């Protein structure tokens, strides 16, 4: 069972991450690979659309590799929109 602020869980192998909200894309993405931050943003006349950036809590750690299957588990309905968690 998930807590009230949780919008879903992500599982891969033994790893489990509880997704709790939206985040701004941070500059650390460009430290990992130059241009990655801009690749995850769409600029429109009305603002930005973010293709990535979520806040999560690691519930069970473990190794995740590039080819691993990822399972997304939604909470019971009614589903809620992700709430921004800006810093």
Image (cartoon, rainbow, N blue to C red):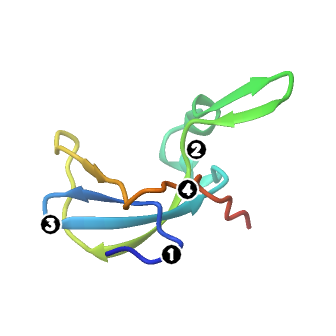
Residue holding disc 3: 14
* Mark 4 Cα-neighbour bin, 10 Å: few <14, some 14–19, many ≥20: few
Instruction: Answer above or below: position of 58 versus 81.
Output: below
* Mark 1 Cα-neighbour bin, 10 Å: few <14, some 14–19, many ≥20: few
Q: CA distance from mark 3 to mark 1?
A: 23 Å
Residue at horizontal 48 percent and vertical 47 percent from the top: 32
Number of the front mark, 4 or 2: 4
Residue holding disc 1: 4
Number of the front mark, 3 or 1: 1
Residue holding disc 4: 80
Closer to the camera in the image, 39 or 1? 1
Residue holding disc 2: 30
* Mark 3 Cα-neighbour bin, 10 Å: few <14, some 14–19, many ≥20: few
**For marks 3 and 4 on the same chain, the one whose residue lies earlier in the sequence:** 3
SS for tag 1? Answer: loop
**For marks 4 and 1 on the same chain, the one whose residue lies earlier in the sequence:** 1
Q: CA distance from mark 4 to mark 2?
A: 31 Å
SS for tag 3? Answer: loop
Residue at horizontal 24 percent and vertical 58 percent from the top: 11
Quarter of the rendering occupied by the N terminus: bottom left
Number of the front mark, 2 or 1: 1
Residue at horizontal 79 percent and vertical 23 percent from the top: 44
The answer to the question of whether label 3 and label 2 lie on touching residues, with beta carbons closer than 8 A, is no
**For marks 3 and 2 on the same chain, the one whose residue lies earlier in the sequence:** 3
């Amino acid at each position: 069972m998930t807590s009230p602020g949780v919008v879903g869980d992500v599982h891969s192998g033994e790893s489990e991450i509880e997704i709790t909200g939206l985040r701004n894309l941070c500059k650390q993405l460009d430290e990992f690979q130059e241009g990655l931050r801009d690749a995850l943003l769409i600029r429109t006349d009305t603002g930005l659309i973010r293709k990535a950036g979520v806040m999560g809590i690691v519930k069970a750690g473990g190794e995740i590799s590039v080819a691993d299957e990822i399972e997304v588990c939604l909470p019971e309905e009614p589903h809620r929109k992700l709430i921004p968690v800006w810093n």
